[in-house]
Amino acid sequence: MSSFKRIAGVLALRISSATTQIIHVKALSGVLFAVIAFLATSCGGTFVPNITEIRGTSGQTQIFIKAILDSIHCEIKNSVQYVISEDQKLAQYQPDHKRIAPWFDDWGMSGLLTLTIAESTEFNPTVSGTPNPMTMFFTLMGGIDLSAQATRINTLNFYYNVSDLAYKEKPCPVGPDGYYIDEHLPGSLLINSDLKLREWLTGQLLYVATGATQLDISDGKAVSQTIRFQIMSSGNVNPVWKLTNALVNSNGKLLSGSRNRTHELALTFGPANTKAKTLVGNAQTEFQAQQFGSSLSSRLLNFLPVSSNILPPFNFLSVP
């Protein structure tokens, strides 16, 4: 009788231990699935993406946009003033003491800023197992794939008269860290970056090695430049469950997310109606082509692979 009680006690202990393990596994699985569900609904693709890298208030977003525009404005203004100053210096060495590009004062500049933010989340659980562990004839695999993607495209057009930039505004002071911009959230390489605008305008409008002007403006030509910064980031999590006859998520990615940011700046300089503050002729046509190209590329970037070279990061154009 005592032996029977001992055996019964051992069996009861083992059953209790197995039950406790099952409860722990269920509890752990429940917590893990809750975390995965939270991440899946909190990741991108299920709501409108933020412009800034760090989620902030609407006021902080406005300050961030203002910081981009202020930095671009300072870059354009300082570049225009430098080119005209160099032109005035070169006039001293000309036989007639005239500027190489006096017509530049009558030009205007149209700009287009495009901010594209795309976020996505993918949920891809997989399972593989042996239906009959005694025979081990084949392994059955299966899975599901759920994904969501959200894209936000913001555009802003602006215009400046070259004469206003050159003669009515003071140059922006430059410190060790670039232009003095108001405190803002991080999120754009257009802020305090060298956009090579001064180098581009100098080479296009002033001189080559011989000292002659490089740009022929006899037919109202225009010059334009497009700069595109693209930043991509992604991450994933893939817990694996090992069961008696099956493996859950042995390959693949259970939950993954990505955030791609494309900040594009398109600038066109050319003849303008300074009173109406708009480009005219070929310059206006060139800027409209830039607007169309920017709109198209913003949409194509959501479908093309990252390694694609169809859309170059820098584009230098001039109306033929």
Image (spheres, rainbow, N blue to C red):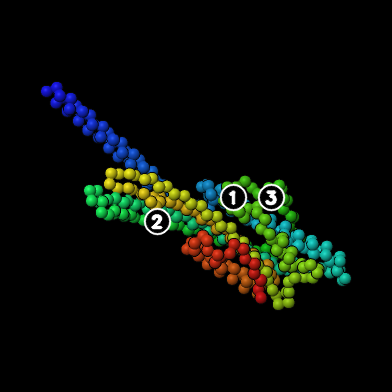
Front in this rendered view, residue 16 or 53: 16
Q: Is residue 173 visible?
A: yes
The residue at which mark 2 appears reads as 147
Residue 105, position as x, y percentages in the image: 75, 67
Q: What's the distance in space between the residues labelled 2 and 3, CA to CA?
A: 41 Å
The residue at which mark 1 appears reads as 63
The local crowd at label 1, few if under 14, some if 14 to 19, many if 20 or more residues have their Cα within 10 Å, is: some
Q: Residue at x 32, y 47 (%)?
A: 247
Label 3: element kind: strand
Please identify the residue farthest to the top as the structure is shown: 2
Of callouts 3 and 1, the N-terminal one: 1
Q: What's the distance in space between the residues labelled 3 and 1, CA to CA?
A: 18 Å
Tag of residue 178: 3
The local crowd at label 2, few if under 14, some if 14 to 19, many if 20 or more residues have their Cα within 10 Å, is: some
Residue 244, position as x, y percentages in the image: 28, 44
Residue 99, position as x, y percentages in the image: 81, 68
Q: Is residue 79 left or right of residue 4?
A: right
